[in-house]
Amino acid sequence: MASGPQLLDDVRYANMTLGRGVQHAATEEVKDLLIRLHGKVESVRQEHEVFRQWCDRADKLYFPPTINERTGADIWPDHESANVNGRQHVSLSLPTPYIDVPSALQAVEPIENILATDSTDEAVAAAAALERVYVAWKNEGDFDIKWHKAIVTKALYGRTAARVYWDADIKAPVVEVINQPRHLFLGWKTDNFEQLEWAAYRMYYDPDSLIEEFGVEVVPFRADDGYTLPFVQQRSWDDIPARPASGLGNTRIEVWDYWYREPVWKGNKFVRMDTYNCVVAGNVVVRPPTKYPEYKGKLPYVPLFNTFVPGVPNGRPDLFDVEPLLREKMERITNGSQMIANVTGGDSYQLTGPDAPLRVPQGLKPVKGGIIAPGPGNRIEVIQPFIAQFQLEQFLTRIDRELATISGLNDLLLGLAPAQVLSSSKAINALISNYEARLSLRRKLLYKWRRDVWNLARDIFGEKNKDVKAIIGRGGGFLDIQDPSLNPRDELETATRAINLVNSKLWSVRRAMDAVGVDDPETELDFIRDERTDATLFPADVQVMAQLLGALQSLGIQAPQGAQAAAEGQAASGTDGLRQALGGATPGGTVATQGDESQGITPPIAGAGPTEG
C-alpha cells in the first residue's frame, strides 16, 4: 500500500482502475472488498471481453463514427477503395433497417391483464386494483419509451438489462434500461444462466465529477511504475486543501456499482439471502455495504437476451449473421460503381507508329472537329475501356435473398413490396404471419422480461407503499401477457370473434375486453353501466330495467340488493336530464302530461302475454 499521496508533476498519467485500486487501497478492510470484487470481475473477463468487442463493432455498423470527405458517413473506412484517389467507394447504411424494423414490430404493446390468484370476490377485486396500479405506474414512468429502447439495445448488442430501484422523490419504483451493456458485468448462480448471483456496473468519472458526486478528494499520486494516478481519499477537516484536479491530465477513475447477496443464518440453519450494495471509486469505498430488504434477496438487474443460445450467457444480435452479406453487397456495388465510372469517364488515346515517342509531347490532345499533328509516322488510336460482361443485378438479388433467409425481413417489411402484393390482403397476411413465426422466441423472452420487471417493481412497491402492500396481501395478481397481432386485419377478426363468443355466452364481457386490449375492464364496465342507465342516452334500456323490476315486485320476488335504489336513482336522473334536454317547457305533474296521447308505448316483456305487464 502507498504511504500517501505525492503531489508530483508528471506527463505520464494512468487511470485509477480496479486493479490499481487493489494495490493502493485505503485500508485493509477496503482492500479485502476490492479483492473480492476484482476476483468476480476477472472470473467473467474472458466472456465479457468477447462481448465488448462485438459491442464496439456493432456501434460502428449502426452509427458510423467516420465521416468521409467524399461520401459522408462511412461504415468501412479502412477499405482500400476509400483510401486510393480515383477509386469509387460506396458505403450504405444497410445495417440500420435490420435493427429498427424488427425492433419496431416487437415494440407493439402486448395485450396485458392481471389475473386473480383465486376465484373469491376479494381476490378478483385485488387483481383489478393491482391492474390499475400497474397501468398508472407504466404511464407515469414512460414505460413504453423504455420498452422500445430496451428492444433496440438487445437487438443491437444481443443482450441488455433493466435496473429497478425506488425513487424517493416520486415515491414509486423506476425502471432504467442499460443502454451500454458492455459496462455491466453479471455473475450467474449456475451454468444455465437463469438467475443472477452478483452484478457490477462500471462507470468512468472525471476527478471533478467524482468530487461533486461523492464528496471525496482526488489528488495526484506517483505509483511505483512511474505513472501518476488520480488517488482518491476521504475528506477530513484536518487535511490541507488538495491540489486542483486539473493537474491530473485526462485521467479518470473507475467507479463500480457492486450488488451482491449474503446468506442469513439462525444458528446452523439457513434463513434467507439478503441483498447488499456498495460503490467503489478507485481505491476507496465511497458508499459502504448497505442492505436493501425490499429486493428480498434478488438483484435490481433483470437481464434481457435477444435470442436463446444454449450454453452462452448472451443472445444472438440481429447483425451477427447479416454483417458478412452486407459487406459483400457493398463490395460488389463499389466494384460496379468503379466499372461504370471507367466507362463514363471517356475514351483513352495512344500514339502508335514506327516513330512513336515513349512520352507524349506536351500539349498534344485530341481536339473535336480539329486537326492534330502527332508527328511523322505516328497516328492516334482510341483505347476503349474494358466492360465486364456479367449480371451484377442478379448477383445482388441473390445476396438480398440470402439476407431475407437469415433475417426473415421480406420486401413488404422493408417497404419494397410491389403493387400487386400491396393490393392483395392474402399476400400481406402471409408475409406478416411468416415473420411473426420468426419472432416467436424473441417475443416470448421479451414478455417474460417485462413480467419479471413488473414483479420486481411490485415487490419494491409493496415494501414502500402501504396501499399496494394491502392489495398484495388480499391476493394481488399475476401479469398475463398475450402476443399482439402485427396485422391490422387480425385485430378486426379478434374483435368480431370476441363479440360472437360473448353473444353465445361462451365468454364473459371482461374476458372479451381483455382479448381486444382494454386496459381496465372493471372501469370500462362501470362506464357502460352509467351510460346504459342514463335515460337521455338509452331510454329504452332504462324503461326495460324499470319494467323488469316492476314485474319482479308483482310476482313477489325480491329484487337484487341495491338494484331497486339504483333503478330509482337512475330513473330520477334520467327524468331530470330529459327535462333539461327538452328545455323544461312542460313542468312535471301537470294535467297536460297525464293524457293517454302523451304517454309512450310500453314495449312488450319478453316471454309474457300480450295483455300482461
Image (cartoon, grey):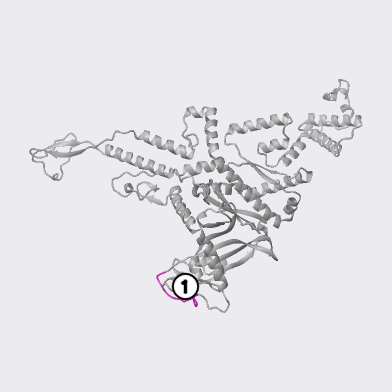
Q: Which of these two is toward me, 574 or 200? A: 200
The residue sitting at the top extreme is 610
Question: In the image, is residue 582 part of the stretch drawn in magenta?
Answer: no
Q: Which of these two is toward me, 314 or 269? A: 269
Q: Is residue 472 left or right of residue 190?
A: right
Q: Tell me the residue that label 1 is attached to.
A: 220
Question: Percent from the top left, x then y, of residue 545?
Answer: 82, 31
Q: Which residues are magenta?
A: 1-12
Q: Exactly how many numbered labels are in the figure?
A: 1
- In the rendered view, tell whether residue 307 sits above or below residue 30: above
Quarter of image, res 29: bottom right
Question: Percent from the top left, x then y, of residue 368?
Answer: 19, 35
Tell me the SS state at disc 1: strand
Residue 459 appears in the figure: yes
Q: Main secondary structure of the magenta part?
A: loop
Label 1 packing within 10 angstroms: few (<14), some (14-19), many (20+) = many
Q: Which of these two is toward me, 543 or 284? A: 284
Question: Percent from the top left, x then y, of residue 239?
Answer: 55, 78
